[in-house]
Image (cartoon, rainbow, N blue to C red):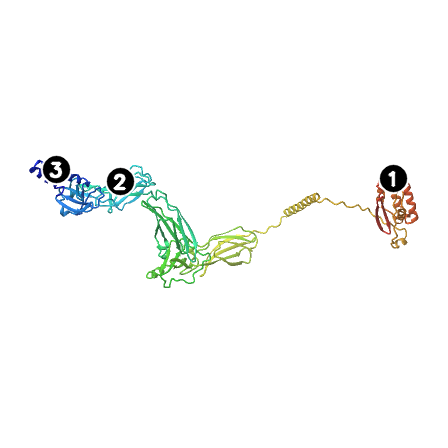
Amino acid sequence: MSLRDFPQYLMETLKCRSSLHKYIVVFIFLTAASKGSACEAPSSPECFRRKADETVYLCEWSMNTTESDVTFVLYIDKEKIRNIKQTWSQVNEEKLIKNRSVDIWVEARVGNSSCTSPRRSVVLGDTVKYAAPQIISMSWLKNDLSLTWRAEGAHPALAEILFRRNDDPAESWEKRTTNTTSYNSKYNATVENLLKDSAYKVQIRHRSTHARNPLWSGWSFVTVPAELEQKPEVTMAIQLLNGTRKVTLTWKPMPHAAAASGVNYNLTDTQSSHGCHCHENRYPQNTSENRHTTHVSFSAVNISVIAQNAAGYSPTAIVQIPAEVAADLKICDKTLLNDTLHWKTCLELYELQDGDSMPKNVITLTGKKKKKAKQIRKNIKDYVRYLYFEHRCDGGKPQTVKMCIFYKKEGVPSKKPQDFISFSETHTSVNLSWKAIPFADQKGYLTHYRLCSVTISSQDVLKACFNISALLMKYRLENLAPGAKYNISLAGVTRVGEGPEATVMINTLPEKPVNVWWSLGLLFLFFFMTTMCTCIFKRIKSKILPPVPTPVIPDFIPYQPESQELLERKEEVHELTLHQLHPEGKSVPEDAEETDVLTGEWDSGTDEDVENKRGDSRMSRGSSDQSLDPGSTDEALRSSREGKMTDLEQVDNEIAMLIYRNGLVFDVKTDSP
């Protein structure tokens, strides 16, 4: 007998039993009731349909227990559903009464105990409870948050939204209730007056607005990040390898509020969109890192980077990788346009109308597009300049094996060089400049320019032409005649022929006579500067190197003999004896006296200036012609000893005798003892 049937049994027993027996029965009932109280009663069940047109009802309840062997019995009016292991059960509508009120409750059984939930009366046909919002997407419209999720019915729903800032857990939840809009099987609700640069925690639930007894759905929790207002700041590093380029892209992380629920980055490139790609660099690619490495060919490539979070996308950051074009690019000698391509080979033709290395019109031909090859080849235009690339996949990486200029058909240029002007004319030269002929008007591969000059001021017309490089846009024309008038023309030349000429008229400067006054001024300035420099040099020299005194050499008056006989006499050298004079009172050695006596033999006449400086005594000895005789010399010496010793003391006993004999001069100095 179950505890549920025990109250009825108790009432029947109390009617027919004795008092003692009644007490025993009540005691047993209370004991059983106390044991059953160990089972905590479950919540009152809810039975409903997810949608108004469904035929299956779902009943849900809850129970706070840690027991694992709990079983439930669901009662729907008179219908009983046993042995339920979970806190929900599905019931087909055939077993139920939908259009009138019925009682529903649930009984929980734990071991020998059981407990019953409160009863609830409902009309099952009017009760609808939606599932919790699913597949929630969000976006910012200025400072309004737009939330979108899957619709549960054909009619709009009523939504209840709770939100608070993500970085402030202590902040209280704010509630907004709003009617949703329904479009394309989706519900949409807008929460106004938020901050789009902040992240929020959001809870959402909804219920039907069409059912008579709608129930609130369960809650759905989402984190709404801030709006991605700025595009990623991408930097690029390129490394040239063998026919390929290694490209490394890095970018700064998004702001913290925008990355609250995580950020992914989507990368795409134009090379893959054209179908010219290898296995390694197949796009689009998605990454959550702030770095990406790929390999690209030598042709122009655009790589776009877009940041994405739960609230939307950032603006697109486009990284332009220009074509790696050689400076001396030549015309193609042979191409693979008419050959059957290997599946790993890819051809690209860039239509260059304005010289841009990032062209808009690109023709791609691969080995995988064999059926479309003929149609693609027909799209190549005549007289149009193309940049031809031939790529191959090497180890999963694109590699450029050939690059050149391609024309399907060539002609002569249709336009002349633009803005052809002259400037800086001199007597014999002039500078010329021009702008290149646009690619669209070249009509072929420009091999060179032809420059011609025609003299129109002279009676004989002289024309000189020569070729200059097609890469030049400036040129200095020299070897012109002074004061002449020239007609100069310039034309572009392709392999087919020469195009229209651009002309300009010039006049070289006439020769001017040399200005005499100007020349004289320069000459005067030269001499003035030379004189000044000489004076300055002499002053500096006198300071640094003082002059050495020049010895005074008196004028020599040769002796004139009185007769021709003396002129014809030959020079003879006689013996010389030097006598030194001594003051009075001093003894003279005999040897010294002999030497002094002999000095008279050499005295043939002395310089007048020397005699004046040395005194009268020297003049009397030097001016006498009788000094040629030895006897006269002795007499002169004696007279000198007698009266002229004072003069000798004044000159510090120095005797200098200038003796001439047969044209020889001797300057002899002796010191007194």
Which residue sits at x=92%, y=44%?
638
CA gap between label 1 and label 2 equals: 147 Å
Q: Residues within 10 Å of mark 3 (few under 14, many from 20)?
A: some
Seen from the viewer's position, the closer of residues 650 and 36 is: 36
Please identify, in this view, whether the residue under mark 2 or under mark 3 is nearer the observer.
Answer: 3
Question: The C terminus is located in which quarter?
Answer: top right
Q: Residues within 10 Å of mark 2 (few under 14, many from 20)?
A: many
Q: Which mark is on residue 26?
A: 3
Place of residue 215 in the rendered image (x, y in percent of width and height, measured from the top left): 20, 41
The residue that disc 1 covers is: 646
**Dot 3 or dot 1, earlier in sequence:** 3
Residue furthest out toward the bottom: 339
CA gap between label 2 and label 3 equals: 53 Å
Q: Residues within 10 Å of mark 1 (few under 14, many from 20)?
A: few
Under circle 1, the secondary element is: helix
The residue that disc 2 covers is: 161
Seen from the viewer's position, the closer of residues 19 and 436 is: 19
Could you tell whether 580 is left or right of 209 in the image?
right
Could you tell whether 53 is left or right of 287 in the image?
left
Seen from the viewer's position, the closer of residues 169 and 151 is: 169
Residue furthest out toward the top: 19
CA gap between label 3 and label 1 equals: 185 Å
Amino acid carrying mark 1 in the image: Thr
Please identify, in this view, whether the residue under mark 3 or under mark 1 is nearer the observer.
Answer: 3
Question: The N terminus is located in which quarter?
Answer: top left
